[in-house]
Image (cartoon, helix red, strand yellow):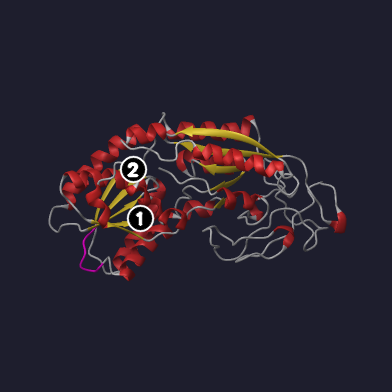
Amino acid sequence: MRRSLLAAAAVALLAGCGSTVQQASLGASGQPAANGDSGLGVPTAAATAGAGSGVGVGTGPAGSNGAVGGPVAAGGTTGGGGTSTPGGTGGAPTGAGGRSRINTPLKLGIAYINNQTASSALGVADPRKNQVKAVIEAYVHGINATGGLDGRKLVPVEYEWHSGDGSWSTAAASACAKFTQDNHVSVVLDEAFGTVGGFRDCLQKAGVFDITNQTVGDNAASAAATLYAGVGGLTLDRTYSAVLTGEMQSGYLHKTDHLGVIVEGCPENERAWSRSLAPLVTRLGLPAPKVVTFNCIDSTAGGATDGQAAISNAILRFRQPPTVDRVMFVSAEEAAALLLFAESASSQDYHPGYLLSSNAQAHLSTESGTGFPADQIPQLHGVGNSPYGDV
């Protein structure tokens, strides 16, 4: 149920069109610690504005992709929302006009997800099937067929995550080991894990730059990770703050409504709720919400079982006076939580309003074969940040 790869946006970042690389995370040689082949340069004594070939360092306000520092152009120019720093030479040959270039192949780790087993466990069909793998491989082939990325041929190292098979943490560790120990890639293009199973943390420790369109965690976790760019979503704090304030502004959420909140018990979800969202509920003047927490998901089978039990109990509690008439989820697995809740609510003739983000992928509710109960669809309301999925 995760989003498909935003291939064009993500690969464009590899060409130097935006980065959240922070100088503090780079070694004295101008390369990320523990990885000397990335070409992500920082200033050297000889570097001059416009002469660097490394990816610029974003220092401006948050850009449209939700990452720290706006898009930054290659070669030391200023991009939207941020400024860049010219890259160091990194030992590469110098071309015309003093511009240094790196033309060795770029080893690129690519993680993508196969949801067929997971979808079956939830009793639904994944309409994408194997489209993600086909899109990724076609895109890499297309780039290489036209001379590579800024003259560098891409050497893909793929990891397909079957999300319905076994522990997610085990899969994340296996993927990280393939990229950082077995193949020593320079950059990972992640359409699978995000922060799940500690995947991003593992890449950070190895000094591998991570470009992801998956969950980027809460504000605290995102700020602590410097070698990544989140191109597909916002932090949990920003995402669900926007949902609450936006629905108040739209009039769908009122001070007289009673809010029910279901929180997946992962550290980033709990921090986002306690530090940002619960205080916001108070500031908005809403009554104290009813909050239900279920265990942090680490497998499809266990997550579906634990989540379904918690959601069934939540519905019983939500229907006790004062009855909850607005429901929201704080979870990287919002789409699955919404599906499980809607199925239980429908079976109990319960029709609350839903406050959703783009993570809920509500557009799938009308897809053939997804099994989403039709009587719950009119109550789906949201504040989105991903037009690709929202419409």
Q: Quadrant of the C terminus?
A: bottom left
Which type of secondary structure does the marked residue at label 2 adopt? loop
Left or right, 194 with reference to 376: right
Identify the residue shown where x is 65% and y is 56%. 17
Q: Which residue is mark 2?
A: 368
Q: Which residue is mark 1?
A: 273
Q: Nearer the viewer, residue 170 or 119?
A: 119
Q: Residue 296: percent from the left, percent from the top?
A: 36, 41
The quarter of the picture where residue 353 lies is: bottom left
Q: Nearer the viewer, residue 188 or 150?
A: 150
> Residue flagged by tag 2: what amino acid is it?
Ser
Is residue 79 visible in the rendered image? The answer is: yes
Q: Residue 26: percent from the left, percent from the top?
A: 67, 50
Inspect the magenta stretch and tell me whether residue 256 lies in it.
Answer: yes
> Nearer the N terminus, badge 2 or badge 1?
1
Identify the residue shown where x is 25% and y is 47%. 342
Q: Nearer the viewer, residue 301 or 224?
A: 301
Q: Residue 197: percent from the left, percent from the top?
A: 46, 38
Vertical arrangement, residue 29 with respect to residue 72, above or below:
above
Is residue 226 visible in the rendered image? The answer is: no
Vertical arrangement, residue 192 with respect to residue 324, above or below:
above
The residues colored magenta run 254-260
**How far apart are the alpha carbons under marks 2 and 1?**
34 Å
